[in-house]
Image: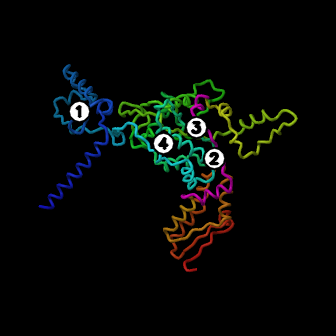
């Protein structure tokens, strides 16, 4: 008897938890796909099918006119009129990932300024994961801190703080995406990373501009209020540069820049939930981008030549003129970038005006690559050491071996991305052979092994 009571109690608790989960999401009309917040109170029918009042009224009007076949978009064939019809057999066509979370009672949650880390604290946390790039980390820390203070600020005094959207310029493999990912993880805010190369003007093949907001909404678990305080990183932004010497419509370049203007400035955008494009089977949700922080990043190839041309034009005349090759071997040439250079590259002035904070990231030299290998919290070497530690093997790297890896990576000219590929190559045999022998206690990677002139040092247990 007691067991039956316990079983009944468990069934009730499970039912209550299921009902609580369902209460977190809005009901979506089976016919017009609008959520309850837009279509009004829903009528729940057997089979967990929800229909809004307007669609139900249209169905009744059609029935009165004798138009039962095809009503409500169900397209019921005339031959099925005399068949028994059970609403519970009709599946619920709203997938789980397309469900929309209900908005909380407070539309705009008040942020606690004291809970926002100060710029020096954000910078200190970034230092644990990102090597070098001191100026970039300082700039992004201040911009993010000011952005969230702006959200929490009061506009009753008439002073409204502008958005601090950012443009990040740096060569491939210098850590642009990794820096933004680390920042979002430290701040615990939703992050969406979009690739500008797939974006096209509305009506053309490719992702619509609003798809970047859809990705942020998905990252926030379809919670609109949470998504409206998130971060969007648009990578490869340099691929949107205006096409030169072309007479065709630039649907994936200048047109996308113009389409992004309203998102960067702040606007209410209707975006599909759980899909990249709008269609009749996907519910829509309105997202306000006013408080979303946009960070754009790109490698901007050949921008150095534009900067050199401008610098040489202003310093190559007169008795004290500089030599034309003065800036040819300047490693910090990107730091001298100006808005004029970006306009000449192909970015439109209106787009650049909505990205007030422009900063550059340095290319990684040999010493920086060695630091990337061993210093961050989740450094590549630490990952392999952890893997071998599971086999009770101590993995070590000689300092000369690390510099040999960095030199090989520099030749590939893909920045820090080359490090993983190089290490995977020479660690393959070690990771394959070590589990065969339980007597191996330590493996030391040498410079000779990296350069294919020798092998690693293997020590047995007890030596």
How far across and down, in percent of the image, does residue 220 sit?
42, 43
Q: Is residue 17 left or right of residue 401?
A: left
381 up-or-down from 72: above or below: below
Which region is colored magenta?
349-378
Give the mark, 4 or 2, whose residue is nearer the N terminus: 2
How far across and down, in percent of the image, does residue 36 sit?
30, 33
* Circle 2 or circle 1, nearest the eye: 2
Q: Residue 43 carries which label?
A: 1
How far across and down, in percent of the image, does residue 105 sit?
33, 38
**SS of the residue under disc 4:** strand
Measured in 3D between alpha carbons, the distance from the residue under mark 4 to the one under mark 2, in whole angstroms, is 24 Å
Give the mark, 2 or 3, whose residue is nearer the N terminus: 2
* Circle 2 or circle 3, nearest the eye: 2
Measured in 3D between alpha carbons, the distance from the residue under mark 4 to the one under mark 3, in whole angstroms, is 15 Å
Residue bearing the label numbered 2: 135
Question: In this orientation, does residue 99 appear?
Answer: no
Q: Is residue 167 left or right of residue 22?
A: right
Give the mark, 2 or 1, whose residue is nearer the N terminus: 1
How far across and down, in percent of the image, does residue 349 sit?
61, 29
Q: Residues within 10 Å of mark 2 (few under 14, many from 20)?
A: few
Q: Which mark is residue 200?
A: none
Give the mark, 3 or 1, whose residue is nearer the N terminus: 1
Closer to the camera in the image, 162 or 421? 162
As for residue 253 lying within the magenta part, the answer is no
Residue bearing the label numbered 4: 192
> Pointers 4 and 3 in contact (CB under 8 A)?
no
Closer to the camera in the image, 102 or 7? 102
Q: Is residue 236 left or right of residue 337?
A: left
Residue bearing the label numbered 3: 237
Question: In this orientation, does residue 202 appear?
Answer: yes
Residue drawn where x is 77% and y is 43% of the image: 328
Residue drawn where x is 67% and y is 68% of the image: 454
């Amino acid at each position: 008897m007691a067991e039956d009571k316990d079983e009944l109690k468990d069934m009730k608790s499970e039912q209550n938890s299921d009902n609580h989960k369902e209460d977190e999401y809005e009901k979506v009309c089976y016919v017009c796909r609008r959520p309850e917040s837009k279509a009004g109170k829903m009528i729940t029918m057997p089979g967990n099918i929800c229909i809004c009042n307007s669609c139900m009224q249209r169905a009744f009007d059609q029935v009165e006119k004798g138009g039962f076949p095809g009503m409500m978009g169900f397209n019921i064939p005339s031959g099925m009129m005399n068949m028994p019809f059970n609403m519970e057999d009709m599946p619920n066509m709203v997938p789980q990932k397309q469900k929309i979370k209900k908005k909380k009672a407070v539309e705009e949650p008040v942020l606690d300024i004291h809970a926002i880390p100060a710029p020096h604290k954000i910078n200190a946390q970034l230092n644990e994961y990102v090597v070098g790039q001191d100026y970039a980390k300082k700039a992004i820390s201040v911009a993010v801190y000011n952005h969230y203070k702006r959200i929490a600020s009061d506009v009753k005094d008439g002073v409204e703080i502008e958005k601090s959207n950012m443009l990040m310029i740096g060569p491939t493999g210098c850590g642009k995406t990794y820096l933004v990912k680390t920042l979002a993880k430290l701040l615990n805010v939703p992050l969406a990373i979009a690739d500008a190369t797939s974006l096209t003007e509305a009506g053309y093949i490719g992702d619509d501009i609003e798809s970047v907001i859809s990705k942020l909404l998905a990252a926030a678990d379809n919670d609109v209020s949470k998504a409206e305080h998130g971060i969007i990183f648009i990578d490869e932004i340099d691929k949107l540069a205006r096409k030169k010497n072309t007479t065709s419509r630039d649907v994936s370049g200048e047109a996308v820049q113009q389409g992004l203007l309203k998102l960067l400035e702040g606007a209410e955008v209707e975006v599909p939930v759980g899909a990249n494009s709008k269609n009749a089977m996907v519910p829509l949700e309105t997202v306000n981008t006013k408080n979303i922080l946009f960070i754009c990043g790109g490698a901007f190839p050949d921008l150095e030549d534009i900067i050199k041309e401008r610098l040489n034009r202003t310093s190559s005349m007169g008795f004290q003129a500089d030599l034309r090759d003065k800036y040819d071997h300047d490693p910090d040439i990107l730091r001298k970038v100006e808005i004029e250079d970006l306009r000449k590259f192909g970015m439109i002035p209106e787009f650049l005006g909505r990205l007030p904070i422009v900063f550059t990231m340095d290319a990684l030299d040999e010493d920086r690559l060695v630091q990337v290998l061993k210093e961050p919290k989740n450094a590549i070497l630490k990952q392999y050491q952890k893997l071998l530690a599971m086999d009770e093997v101590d993995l070590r790297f000689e300092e000369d071996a690390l510099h040999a890896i960095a030199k090989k990576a520099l030749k590939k000219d893909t920045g820090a991305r080359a490090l993983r590929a190089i290490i995977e190559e020479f660690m393959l045999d070690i990771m394959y052979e070590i589990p065969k022998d339980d007597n191996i206690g330590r493996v030391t990677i040498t410079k000779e092994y990296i350069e294919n002139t020798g092998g690693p040092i293997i020590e047995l247990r007890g030596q």
